[in-house]
Amino acid sequence: MGERAERIIRRALSEGRKNLTGLEAKEVCRDYKIPVPKYRLAKSEREAVEFAKKIGFPVVLEVVSADVLHKTDIGGIYVNLKSPSEVRAHYRMILENVRKRRPDAKVEGIMVREMAPSGIEVIVGGIRDPQFGQTVMFGLGGIFVEVFKDVTFRVAPVAREEAEEMLREIRGYQILKGYRGMPKADEGALIAIIQRTSDLLMDFPNISQMDLNPIMAYERGAMVVDAKIVL
């Protein structure tokens, strides 16, 4: 069991929270060696610029608040920021947007994170099923999961052979194989994410829902762009 993940989840429960912040969810993922972009929590414009320079442009800024679940809806996230002046301006804009649309929200700061290069979008998820317990999902991400619902499930714990089957079972498997000259996805990296998600769900039966979406799959490696965890 990941010690850092345990501290984060215990703290959220002690505060009466069901939702982890985006920052907390990334910390939990990192504790289980699930790859996430580089990120830092900024408490001021100066820190945001400093962290952006260290991480490397372009960057993403997003509000960190347990009270804000849908950041896009309230202007709490901006992507592809390419300069210190853009970071400063959008840092202020995020705080203004949150104050205007969610004045009750407690803001911990602004996460500055690496802008992940585009790749094949996939999703790995978890849900606590009333009958089967902790269950892992895999499928194509982005619009594919919304429109085609091209996903498959396994009851945790998920063995490597089962994770391999999950990749092959989806209708869009050819996309992972490099359809019509597109780069193929690193299947080993996706299998590792599925298994580590399974480990996390087994270690924490109080996780009721988990979404790693989108995950950008590359020819070498993969990266979880956004993570949501509900207790």
Image (spheres, helix red, strand yellow):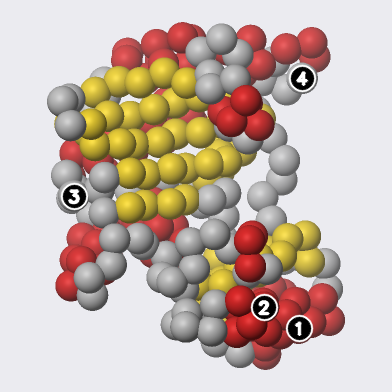
Q: CA distance from mark 3 to mark 2?
A: 33 Å
Closer to the camera: disc 1 or disc 3? 3
Q: Spatial distance from mark 1 to mark 2, Cα to Cα?
A: 14 Å
Provide the secondary structure element on which disc 2 rests. Answer: helix
Q: Residues within 10 Å of mark 3 (few under 14, many from 20)?
A: some
Q: Residue at x 69, y 35 (%)?
A: 119
Query: Residue beneath label 4, please?
Result: 182
**Vertically, is 29 above or below 130?**
below
Which labelled disc corresponds to residue 97? 2
The kind of residue tagged 3 is Asn
Structural distance between the alpha carbons of marks 3 and 4:
39 Å
In the drawing, what numbered circle is on residue 206?
A: 3
Name the kind of residue labelled 1 in the image: Arg
Mark 1 highlights which residue? 88
| Residue closer to the observer: 31 or 68 | 68
Q: Mark 1 and 2 residues: CB-CB less than 8 Å, in contact?
A: no
The picture quadrant where one finds residue 214 is top right
Report the Cα–Cα distance between label 2 and label 4: 39 Å
Dot 4 crowding, Cα within 10 Å, few <14, some 14–19, many 20+: few
Q: Amino acid at mark 2?
A: Asn
Residue 205 on image: x %, y %? 17, 44
